[in-house]
Image (tube, helix red, strand yellow):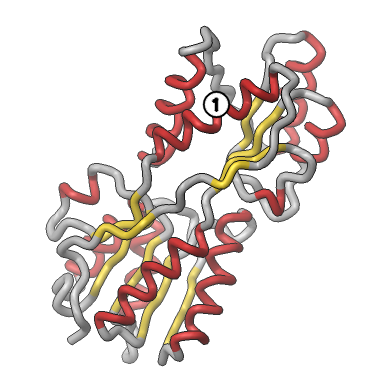
Amino acid sequence: MEPFYMELISGLEAGLAVHSYSLLLQMVHDHGHEIEVHRRWRNDHSVDGVLICDVGVDDGRVPALEELGLPAVVIGPPSVSGALASIWSDDGVSLAEAVRYLVTLGHRRIARVGGLPHLAHTAIRTRRFAALAEEFGLDSAVAVPSDYTGEDGARVTRDLLGGGDRPTALIYDNDIMAVAGLAAAQGMGLSVPRDLSIVAWDDSPVCQLVRPPLTALARDISAYGTHAARLLLAAVDGLPVTSVHDEPAHLSPRGSTAPPP
């Protein structure tokens, strides 16, 4: 349900269609089931290559695909892609840009509503956020995990804002949680950005439809998908492929951020 994936899939399809390839989406219950599907695809030659997303810190799909020899590309950091080629953008760079912007505005109590902690990109963001808090000497820097849904984003927001020493700025790991967090904060009687600044990760159209429009970390996700498709097609053709560092997300300031009260 994340706009990120709709844009990513659009870019993948655009990149594959140029070479007359089609994109197959297969729903699975878990990684074990997914590995079984990969094995079946390899044995019956029903696909030429695969892309895997949301790679975990210790992800069994990577060694399984290495063993199968099925052309594969990881959409995620090379630190967890093993011998497989990967396409990624440095989330640490993007997070540093967002935190630096908030600190420049004067914020000293910043919280982050993170994603699922076992995912590799979440772990990178969590480590970087802790390092940035120390670098800037923040008075408070709390990172709380969530499941990426609007419901959980709203719940975590209410918990963070319900205390006496509440943060003056929140960074959300996706746009859905940021929109839900905005509604939760306004439901608690807080004004954004007068009482609270909000930054969203992933700049989907919904970020500009809410009021105030959300400051967001933005990048061309469709182009990211197209680049991933090109990398996979090269692997399918048997060409030597290496990991690609794509353009990181950059901050687009809007009406949801301001100096703290």
Q: Against 52, is 77 above or below?
A: below
Image position, residue 49 (x, y; %): 68, 21
Residue 49 lies, with reference to residue 181, above or below; the image says above
Q: Position of residue 222 (x, y in %)?
A: 40, 33
State how many labels appear.
1
Q: Quadrant of residue 160?
A: bottom left
Element under disc 1: helix
Q: Nearer the viewer, residue 145 or 53?
A: 53
The residue lying at 52 percent from left, 50 percent from top is: 89
Viewport quadrant of the C terminus: bottom left
Residue 3: image location, x then y, percent:
36, 39
Q: Residue furthest front?
A: 240
Left or right of residue 4: residue 84: right
**Which of the 4 image quarters holds residue 170?**
bottom left
Q: As shown in the figure, which amino acid type bears the numbered disc 1? A: Ala
Disc 1: CA contacts within 10 A as few (<14), some (14-19) or many (>=20): many
The quadrant in which residue 75 appears is top right
Q: Position of residue 243 (x, y in %)?
A: 66, 42
Furthest residue in direction right, as rendered: 67
- Residue 144 vs 69, above or below: the answer is below
The residue at 55%/79% (across/down) is: 131
Q: Is residue 162 visible?
A: no
Question: In the image, 7: left or right of 197?
Answer: right
* Residue 86 seen in this snapshot: yes
Q: Residue at x 50, y 85 (%)?
A: 135
255 and 113: which one is in front?
255
Name the foreground residue: 217 vs 142: 217
The residue beneath circle 1 is 229
- Quadrant into which the N terminus falls: top left
Image point 37% across, 79% down: which residue? 110
